[in-house]
């Protein structure tokens, strides 16, 4: 099994990034990490669904792959529960990071793995003389030249066909040829308004499924009979309604600044997701008004991890422009989805999205 299949398990595939005003939807299941996994020592007591987002954050912070800390057997099967020297070091680092934050930063997650590691497994101990300084944080821009956040969202809705046309599409069945870094796969994303989703990833005969019924997110992997808890905020964003119906996925849109992306002018809108562990920014093309990127920072047990979704090749489906190409970039790699068929309004029962027994 390749890294990429574990990666699904990592749930980090697409932050195709969901409930209602303010709070994250309460999952009906909240299995503790040590019950779902075999060898948990530092994350004991945290929800199982938080483990893989934390793994993604550590992987990105150190600029490594899962293999850096985890062993595989001679057939290439992952042995995530097996301890390695690096895994032990990482546990010590988690304890150190917590102590730094509790001793100095009122227990806030101020210092993270990324603060020191900056994408390197071995942090620099010398000043980076001669290198350009790190880029500054984007700052808010105000003034009459910059439209309001809400007007940009309205302009986007008009650009894709308008809310009335979008409301006429109640379900979407989308098939894609996908590429997870270098591993090809077939993907089917079935979604129902306002954001229920079932995402099936097929690597030859090996099938990995992720579902979200509007409250509970779950996952089931090839070769594993167990159904796992997943992070609702990660799974919900697989739904195309996250970008077709932003007003049902975000509770508010805030400050705007102007920037460029791949040589094009864009407005960047800060957005409060209905999942309170996410901070997001929406990038709208100044000329077309279309959504070209969603940037997401996901809070995990070891600090925030960033990721982007890039949308292009918008095509008409029942009067609504839908991006036929989506590129998902995380610390672990780049995943590309090229949609081949998009079928609106197929009859899909709600039961399709419910967490299966087992
Ligand atoms: C920097 C080291 C590091 C990296 C990189 C890393 N992990 Fe981990 N992983 C750990 C540590 C440490 C634990 C044990 C946590 C604990 O003791 O609470 C763990 C535990 C796990 C577990 C639970 C295993 C069990 O049954 O106990 C899984 C699954 C896992 N990691 C998957 C991944 C995946 C997938 C990736 C790549 C996206 C990854 N890890 C990257 C350090 C790492
Ligand atoms: C305060 C700074 C700091 C923070 C925070 C920090 N690290 Fe480290 N980490 C270091 C330093 C420094 C080293 C190198 C130690 C050495 O060279 O002996 C290191 C080494 C490591 C190594 C061993 C690398 C190797 O090549 O063997 C791992 C794995 C690691 N850190 C994981 C993590 C993880 C995961 C986190 C977050 C939970 C984290 N670190 C947070 C400073 C930090």
Image (tube, rainbow, N blue to C red):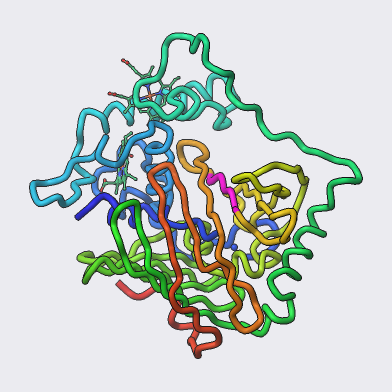
Farthest residue to the left: give it: 74
Residue 227, compared with residue 306, is above or below; it is below
Q: Is residue 336 magenta?
A: no
Figure quadrant of residue 125: top left
Q: Nearer the viewer, residue 145 or 138?
A: 145
Image spot of residue 227 (x, y percent):
32, 66
Q: Nearer the viewer, residue 154 or 302?
A: 154
Farthest residue to the front: give it: 263
Image spot of residue 263 (x, y percent):
63, 44
Q: Nearer the viewer, residue 264 or 109?
A: 264
Position of the N terminus, as image quadrant, is bottom left
* Residue 268 visible (yes or no): no
Q: Residue at x 88, y 46 (%)?
A: 145
Farthest residue to the right: give it: 144
Position of the C terminus, as image quadrant, is bottom left
Q: Main secondary structure of the magenta part?
A: strand
Part of the protein shown in magenta:
293-298
Quadrant of ligand 2: it is top left
Residue 200, compared with residue 332, is above or below; it is below
Q: Nearer the viewer, residue 82 or 15?
A: 15
Q: Is residue 240 toward the left or the right of residue 159 in the image? A: left
Q: Residue at x 29, y 42 (%)?
A: 66
Q: Residue at x 28, y 64 (%)?
A: 221
């Amino acid at each position: 099994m390749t890294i990429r299949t574990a990666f699904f398990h990592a749930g980090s595939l697409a932050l195709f990034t969901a409930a209602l005003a303010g709070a994250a939807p309460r999952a009906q299941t909240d299995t503790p990490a040590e019950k779902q996994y075999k060898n948990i020592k530092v994350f004991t007591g945290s929800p199982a669904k938080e483990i893989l987002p934390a793994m993604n954050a550590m992987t990105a912070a150190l600029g490594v792959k899962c293999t850096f800390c985890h062993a595989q057997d001679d057939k290439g099967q992952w042995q995530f529960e097996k301890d390695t020297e690096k895994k032990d070091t990482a546990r010590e680092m988690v304890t150190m990071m917590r102590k730094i934050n509790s001793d100095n930063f009122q227990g806030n997650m101020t210092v993270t793995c990324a603060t020191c590691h900056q994408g390197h497994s071995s942090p620099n101990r010398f000043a980076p003389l001669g290198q350009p300084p790190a880029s500054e944080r984007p700052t808010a821009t105000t003034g009459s030249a910059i439209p309001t956040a809400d007007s940009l969202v309205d302009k986007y809705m008009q650009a894709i066909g308008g809310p009335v046309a979008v409301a006429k599409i109640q379900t979407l069945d989308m098939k894609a040829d996908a590429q997870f870094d270098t591993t090809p796969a077939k993907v089917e994303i079935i979604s129902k308004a306002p954001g229920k989703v079932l995402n099936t990833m097929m690597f030859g005969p090996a099938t990995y499924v992720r579902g979200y019924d509007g409250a509970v997110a779950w996952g089931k992997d090839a070769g594993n009979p167990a159904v796992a808890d997943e992070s609702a905020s990660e799974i919900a964003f697989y739904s195309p309604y996250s970008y077709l119906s932003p007003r049902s996925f975000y509770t508010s849109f805030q400050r705007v600044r102007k920037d460029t992306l791949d040589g094009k002018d864009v407005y960047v809108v800060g957005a409060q997701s209905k999942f309170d562990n996410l901070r997001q920014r929406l990038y709208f093309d100044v000329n077309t008004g279309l959504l070209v990127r969603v940037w997401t920072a996901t809070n995990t047990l070891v600090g925030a991890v960033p990721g982007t979704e890039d949308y292009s090749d918008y095509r008409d489906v029942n009067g609504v422009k839908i991006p036929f190409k989506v590129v998902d970039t995380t610390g672990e790699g780049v995943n590309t989805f090229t949609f081949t068929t998009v079928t609106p309004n197929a009859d899909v029962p709600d039961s399709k999205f419910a967490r299966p027994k087992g």
